[in-house]
Image (cartoon, rainbow, N blue to C red):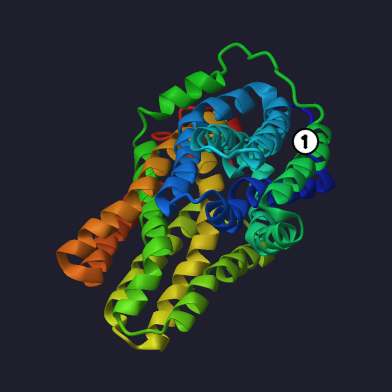
Amino acid sequence: MPAAELAPRAQWTLAALQLMSWGSFFYAFSVLALPMEVELGWSRPATMMAMSLALVVAGLLAPTVGHAIDRGHGRRVMTCGSILGAAMLLIWSASSAKPILYAAWTGLGAAQAMTFYDAGFAALTRRLGGGAPRAIMRMTLLGGFAGTVFIPLTGWLADTCGWRGALMILAAINLLAAAPLHWLVLAGDRVEPVAEGQATPRGASMGALRQRAFWMLVVTFCTWSLAFGSLTFHLLPLLAERGVSDAVGIALLASVGPLQIAGRVGLMLHRGAMPARLLGRALTVMLVAAVLILYAAGANIWLIAAGVALYGVANGMVTILRGIAVADYLGVAGFGRKSGMISAINGFALALAPYLAGLLWTGGGYGLVLAGLAAAAATGALAFWSLPAAGSAAERPETSASRN
């Protein structure tokens, strides 16, 4: 690992930058899509295609971005990501034709890959090694407030300056604040020579494909992506099918964000070590339990609320698990590329989730959807529970010095 570490202030600053990146390159879309549709007369599917493009591009680029950070280019990658994102927001602000919008969001997908959690986790792990988990918790904690801060901020900017003006201001925030801060806090990031006998980051990451632990983690996190993608887009119609009012349904869906933050705060307050094995086993069981409660709840609002609460808390903590399980089970060498490969596969699962849930719904309503999610969650739990103790020789080709 490079000798230059990150001071606590730099770690908190890097965490705050996640809030800016997620707020500008993800959550702003949910606010500005409607006024854009109204002005330009576009259909909802045509508009939503822009975000779909971004997510696909982000997933495809994740391994490459992670590999670049592993090699010591994190400072350049994350700074250029903020600059690229600012440029794409400006192009979006000037768009009046769909090809321009789609081009902008293709670029924003690249900016997402260069600035979002996977890139941040890779930068922290490269600089801090076994000390990264606490910093990862801080990053996900502040990043969890991105929607809370930027959805109302973007709405206020749109009301005040119009949607095009709002995008220009968001671009300025990333160009004048996020990019310089990324450059400053990651000072000292550099490419270092590989010692004789030490696995290169690329070689370590390719070796992960031959490890059973890698594929078990893929299965585990893909089941979370299926659950997240399905419940995010289908929870409201699911509740409506059971006779729950729109107001209550919206309140329950809106509670997921604060519940995620609550789960992360709980981990932050935990003073001792947080082994990935213990955390992962607990979270996979929580997901199975949450889906089963929703399946059995019927129209009982208290059981529904309990299921949503359990899901929300667990979903907040699984982001942290993503950051620490890769290092624990696969090693810190080549962390960025390994994490990026898992993220790329998860991206396709996330993209397919709403569609697959819709197919199940046509075949048997939301009871069948929840039964399918319960089966998927159980599969993910079995995959994670089958993992050996983190750092075992069978699953870790790197030296013990890389152990978390």
Q: Position of residue 69 (x, y in %)?
A: 63, 27
The answer to whether 370 appears left or right of 319 in the picture is left
Q: Residue at x 47, y 36 (%)?
A: 59
Q: Is residue 362 above or below residue 322?
A: below
Percent x, y of residue 164 = 69, 47
Task: Kindly identify the amino acid type of the residue bearing the numbered disc 1.
Answer: Ala
* Horizontal side of residue 198 vs 56, given as left or right: right
Q: Residues within 10 Å of mark 1 (few under 14, many from 20)?
A: many
Residue in front for this viewpoint, 123 or 298: 298
In the figure, residue 404 lies in which quadrant? top right
Find residue 332 and report its horizontal and vertical position in percent.
57, 33
Q: Quadrant of the N terminus?
A: top right
Query: Going by the image, does 108 lie left or right of 49?
Result: right
Q: Name the outermost residue toward the left.
A: 363
The residue sitting at 40% across, 87% down in the picture is 301
Residue positioned 37% across, 32% down in the render: 211
Residue highlighted by disc 1: 179
Q: Is residue 206 visible?
A: yes
Q: Is residue 81 left or right of residue 110?
A: right
At a point 81% along the width and 43% down the height, the residue shown is 10
